[in-house]
Image (cartoon, rainbow, N blue to C red):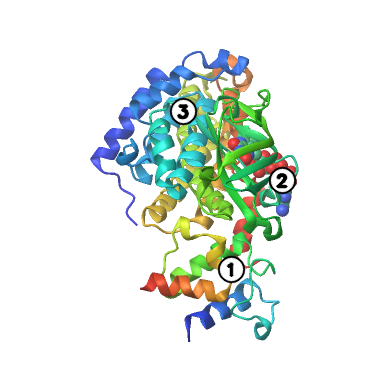
């Protein structure tokens, strides 16, 4: 395995980092407080080509490989302190663009991808239901076939981007007798009759990324809205989760590096008992552990990228990466608050927000417990 | 060993060891009977890669291709060309 980066990849990462630092950190404290999405930042990302990264040129994208996508998302994680904006980008790219790219018909690709790549429309996906969270395949929403149309009914919750999305990939049962193998995916446009988006939900973190419930009430869509074949829902969901579990968490790594740099600087500057607090082993060892977690997280993500770049499945490896990085991000964020003392607890120092933002990482894309179940099942348990 | 037999042996020894191999017909549904769930399919795909050098793409990771042992064997044969 060769994880070295090409000069172009290094340069690209540097330019994304510079862009993020300069353009994406406007009023983050205030917008976190008022739960406001950064449309300006979204558009600037589109101008730079972020949303276009994984889309091939023929559909208006730049067709970058997964390593380059991950590098860009890592650089954004470092340079951009608005984790909600990044989370919305991730939902858009990995849970909507990638499924359309992988499973969509040519018409669907032409209809959605160029505008998604240009950031003109926003996407997301709707799997979770009030009664079906970790056990996602026990969903109850139905899509009943009537001639050349489907009638969708059911309710979805915790749907990222729903309040701002133009299209959501909605999962529903087309064949109840088949259970998980009877789930299909549908691209449902905003404004479709019977497609009702609730008020934004208030959250502990990632507040600048809007989330809502979605209700489907006799929501009628033409057959052409189905993504892939009938029953392909689980395949679509699995494929998008592999992407999300690898690319989304590369932004966590970027954030963790920024956080560590800030901690190191603070530990050098802050003096107690006549010396820098970084001279106390109890403090410096925390940062050594933070560094170790970043290094290991980076290695496992590179392995996932290497496997996926070779067209291999990375189901086990992406579960390990997701579990390790999400839990490391929470631990590093707790350590960062501790190192900053009381200042770390205060909003204006922008240390506590990382902790609030990272906790969701142990829940979405499959909880930590579910990742451990996946890993255990690969052990034959 | 024929492709279908190799697949059957893997399913009945590794994925569903409680299953009596002699009672599993090659045209019997693996999905409605719960022999394969979505996680076991992922493991089966890794096995097909190791055993036959066949890489199942995301869009081939479709329940229809894994409905029966015959269907899985057909997918493998087609991909081996
Ligand atoms: C910020 C955020 C954004 C999200 N965005 C989206 C989105 O865009 N689209 C979407 O569809 N969903 C989204 N979700 C939903 C997310 O995928 C679910 O919250 C997650 O799958 C867990 O489901 P649940 O919340 O119902 O918890 P539950 O499944 O009820 O779990 C509760 C607890 O029980 C544990 N548990 C459950 N089953 C097991 C088991 N078998 N073994 C061990 N422990 C178990 C869980 O790990 C957890 O600790 C989002 C969630 C969050 C927090």
Among the 4 quarters of the image, the one containing residue A2: bottom left
Tag 1 secondary structure? loop
Q: Which residue is mark 2?
A: A132
| Foreground residue among A226 and A358 | A226
**Chain that bears disc 2:** A
Q: Residue furthest right?
A: A131
- How far is disc 2 from disc 1 in space, using C-alphas? 24 Å
| Residue B11 spot, x, y in % from top left | 60, 75
Camera sees residue B81:
yes
Q: Which residue is mark 1?
A: B67
| Residue B52 spot, x, y in % from top left | 42, 74
Camera sees residue A249:
no
| Foreground residue among B18 and A380 | B18
Residue at point 59% right, 18% down? A32
Tell if the residue under mark 2 belongs to the same chain as the one under mark 1. Answer: no
* Ligand 1 under 8 Å from disc 2 Cβ: yes
- How far is disc 3 from disc 1 in space, using C-alphas? 37 Å
Q: Which residue is mark 3?
A: A121
Tag 3 secondary structure? loop
| Residue A236 spot, x, y in % from top left | 53, 50
Among the 4 quarters of the image, the one containing residue B37: bottom right
- The quadrant of the picture occupied by the C terminus of chain A is bottom right
């Amino acid at each position: 395995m060769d994880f070295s980066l090409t000069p172009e990849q290094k340069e690209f990462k540097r330019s994304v980092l510079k862009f993020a630092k300069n353009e994406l950190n406007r009023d983050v404290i205030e917008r976190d407080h008022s739960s406001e999405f950064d449309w300006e930042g979204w558009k600037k990302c589109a101008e730079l080509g972020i949303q276009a990264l994984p889309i091939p040129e023929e559909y208006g994208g730049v067709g970058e490989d997964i390593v380059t996508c991950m590098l860009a998302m890592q650089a954004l994680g470092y340079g951009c302190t608005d984790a909600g904006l990044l989370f919305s980008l991730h939902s858009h790219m990995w849970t909507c663009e990638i499924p359309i790219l992988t499973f969509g018909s040519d018409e669907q690709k032409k209809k959605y991808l160029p505008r998604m790549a240009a950031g003109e429309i926003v996407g997301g996906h709707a799997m979770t239901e009030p009664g079906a969270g970790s056990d996602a395949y026990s969903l109850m929403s139905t899509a009943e076939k009537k001639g050349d149309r489907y009638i969708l009914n059911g309710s979805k919750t915790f749907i990222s981007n729903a309040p701002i999305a133009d299209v959501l990939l909605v999962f529903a049962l087309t064949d109840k007798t088949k259970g998980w193998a009877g789930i299909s995916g549908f691209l449902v446009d905003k404004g479709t009759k019977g497609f009702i988006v609730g008020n934004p939900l208030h959250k502990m973190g990632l507040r600048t990324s809007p989330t809502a419930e979605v209700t489907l009430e006799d929501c009628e869509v033409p057959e052409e809205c189905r993504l892939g074949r009938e029953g392909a829902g689980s395949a679509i969901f699995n494929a998008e989760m592999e992407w999300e579990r690898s690319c989304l968490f590369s932004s966590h790594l970027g954030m963790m590096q920024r956080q560590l740099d800030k901690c190191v600087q603070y530990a050098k500057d802050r003096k107690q008992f006549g010396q820098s607090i970084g001279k106390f082993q109890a403090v410096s060892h925390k940062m050594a552990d933070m560094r170790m977690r970043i290094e290991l997280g980076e290695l496992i993500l590179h392995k996932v990228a290497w496997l996926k770049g070779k067209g291999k499945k990375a189901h086990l490896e992406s579960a390990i990466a997701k579990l390790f990085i999400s839990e490391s991000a929470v631990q590093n964020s707790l350590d960062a608050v501790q190192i900053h003392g009381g200042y770390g607890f205060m909003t204006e120092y922008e240390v506590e927000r990382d902790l609030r933002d990272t906790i969701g990482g142990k829940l979405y894309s499959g909880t930590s417990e579910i990742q451990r179940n996946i890993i255990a099942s690969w052990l034959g348990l | 060993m024929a492709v279908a037999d190799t697949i059957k042996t893997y399913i009945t020894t590794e994925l569903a060891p409680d299953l009596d191999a002699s009672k599993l017909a090659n045209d019997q549904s693996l999905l409605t009977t719960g022999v394969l769930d979505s996680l076991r399919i992922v493991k089966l795909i890794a096995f097909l890669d190791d055993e036959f050098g066949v890489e199942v793409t995301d869009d081939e990771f479709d329940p229809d291709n894994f409905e029966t042992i015959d269907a899985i064997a057909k997918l493998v044969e087609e991909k081996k060309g």
